[in-house]
Amino acid sequence: MKIAYFTERPYRWVDEEVVLKNKAFFAVPNTHFDRKKGSDDYNHYLDEACYAEEQGFDAVCLNEHHGNPFCMGNVLNVEAAILARITKKVKIVLIGNPLPVIKHPLRMAEELAEIDLISRGRLVTGWVRGAGSEQYFNNANPAYNREMFNEAHDFIIQAWTKPGPWRYEGKHFHYRHVNPWALPFQEPHPQMWIPGVLSPETVLWCADHAYPYIGLGTSLGPTCDLWDFYAEQAAQNGYQAGSENFGYLVPTFLADTEEKAQELGRGFVYGGGQNAFSAPQYTLPPGYNSKGAIRNLAKQPGGSWLGVNREKMAGGDDAPAPKTTNYDEVRQKLVKGFEKGQRNLQLLIGTPKSVIPKIKQILDVIRPGTLTFFAVQGPVGNEDRLRSMQLLGEHVIPEIREYSQKIGLKDPFERKTGSVKLTHGTKRAPVVDREALKHFKFEA
Amino acid sequence: MANVTEKSEKLAGSELAIIRGGSGKPLLMLHDELGFPGWMEWNEALAGDRQFIIPRQPGFDKSPRIDWIRSYRDLGGYYAQVLRELKLGQVDVVAFSAGAYIAAEMAASNPDVFGHMALVGPMGLRPTEGVIADFIAMSMRTHLRSTVADPFNTPEFLKIYGGEMTPEQFENFEDARAETARIGWEPFMFNPSLPHLLQGTASIKTALVWGTKDNFTPRGCVEAYQKAIPSAKLIEIKNAGHRPEIEKSGEFVAALKQFLAS
């Protein structure tokens, strides 16, 4: 098993009420950005990655978002390039570069090759479509998101593997002269891991390419369903999926006492947490979702064109939004979500003693080959963040590593994805343990 | 009530749903970026002496998306071919919002295609001032409400959008927005070369219809058209928003009838 460290690199100095009033992190005005504090944060997060290496993590993960204080990783390749030089052993895992948003796959191929070369082959490059809000921020046409993702991905593979120079005339990208001089250190190219939050189309695409799929803190039940879905498609494609095909990321915060962990762990719901990443109109831009996904959304009950029913409208009652909001009440609701997240094992908060058994339960059910600990959000100080990492490194990682070996979890470096062939008509082996899942009582 | 029919036809290499209603000289109607809203009072008022021909834009409702159409200019070219195959000769057109963008592209390519061209709250040109509302970045509710000046006192608007949405309506709405994003994303709902190409369209009798409370296409939109087509007549509908045809139906019909008879 590979154990990784991930942080969104949150900007920790915006007052929570600013985010709550905006009802989302995306589109918080950048007048709230303090350059000195931002500079300190960027440097601290690079130091954190080095500290993760010291603490025995196998990998550090980076992502990117745009236009919000939730994640300061705006150009993740910049950070990856620095880490390539200042770390020595850890894999640098990108989850991932938003291909349709960047819109320049040749440049992407060159940047990643440089990073892989500087790191001497430690890059794991992943791809994402980019969240809905990224399409707005980068003026990337959401109706072509999936097409551009697929074309950019295929082009990059070719740029790394097909001897140049050659000319490329695609649908969305056109290059007169493809001949990137620097090719990745790893032959033919770095591994690719694909993060997701339960999009069936992405899972199918991963299974077709035998790419590891990384579930981003998804609920265990639906995660099992989707991994079975992956394994079925893999079987259709003639291979047996295993732990090497799956990874899992789980928000985790440790402290020396349960009380302190609970107090600071609430940073995960600061400003509304992940659920407040962007407002609905930015989350689902038109054309971004597949026709099937839209059809499912359309079946949700209670839809009204104008947000109020015909009766109210006919009476002229526009049901105006309240002018004042009680933010203490809002916070109380968030805390309830924080507690429920812990009961559903989607948030791991506590001491090593209380958290280790929960991690083992997760591993038992979904059997991932990689496990990523997502560090706390919100205004948690450097010292407490580092202490959480230290507790993970000293107490959790050794025990989890041993346990993963005991239950046979192999990562994609130990066993190549797609390498276990399955002859047509042979029944595939299970990839999740549904008996272990039955021990949980999940709350909706 | 006019006899209104809808039929899918194979035209210019693709299936296209066309709504027809009324009788008399053909009048092409190009609907807006949300699709054909239904047969409204203004349609009925004109249907006595005009036959409406209303194609549902490819990608909207029953008309399948056409993959090669990637811009409003492409779409205009497709519709031009449709008109040729329908053998309508020169027709009059009334076109709304993004539909007006299509009509302008068609006119710019071939000024003989239209006799009269009424562009209502037209998109397609960079406004001389202000910006075309970014309706793609609005919630459904905000989008719809901002198309009319007074949503709760516009009965026909409530008739279309006042109630619960069916799953089919939701899907059609999202399809329409997706197709509009696909072909109009950048620059958003205008074509920088269009004003230059419109300079050859003086032979088309053109009216620009604009509600004085239109927040969607600001006054700068019609001013841009006036600059490109100096002979165009401006018809202002006071206190109407982006849908004067249902907000001030009587005034709209009177003005349109007068224009089409000119």
Image (cartoon, helix red, strand yellow):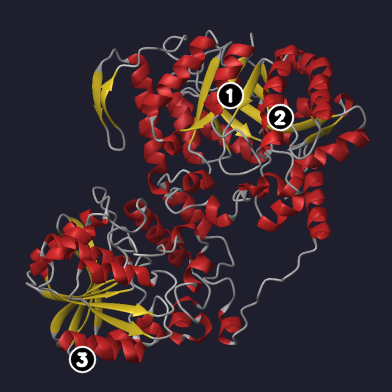
Q: Quadrant of residue B16?
A: bottom left
Q: Chain of mark 2?
A: A
Q: CA distance from mark 2 to mark 3?
A: 73 Å
- Which residue is the site of mark 2? A40
* Residue drawn where x is 70% and y is 51% of the image: A19
Q: Which mark is residue A345?
A: none
Callout 1 secondary element: helix
Q: Residues within 10 Å of mark 3 (few under 14, many from 20)?
A: some
Observer-nearest of A265 and B216: B216
Callout 2 secondary element: helix
- Which residue is the site of mark 1? A79
x, y percent for residue A383: 83, 26
- Which residue is the site of mark 3? B48
Q: Chain of mark 3?
A: B
Hey, what amino acid is under mark 2? Asp
Callout in the foreground (1, 3): 1
Q: Quadrant of residue B156?
A: bottom left
Are the two marked residues, 1 and 3, in contact with CB atoms closer than 8 angstroms? no
* Residue drawn where x is 17% and y is 59% of the image: B197
Q: Residues within 10 Å of mark 1 (few under 14, many from 20)?
A: some
Q: Is residue B121 visible?
A: yes
Q: Residues within 10 Å of mark 2 (few under 14, many from 20)?
A: few
x, y percent for residue B64: 28, 57
Hey, what amino acid is under mark 3? Gly
Residue B164 sits above or below residue B139 on the image: below
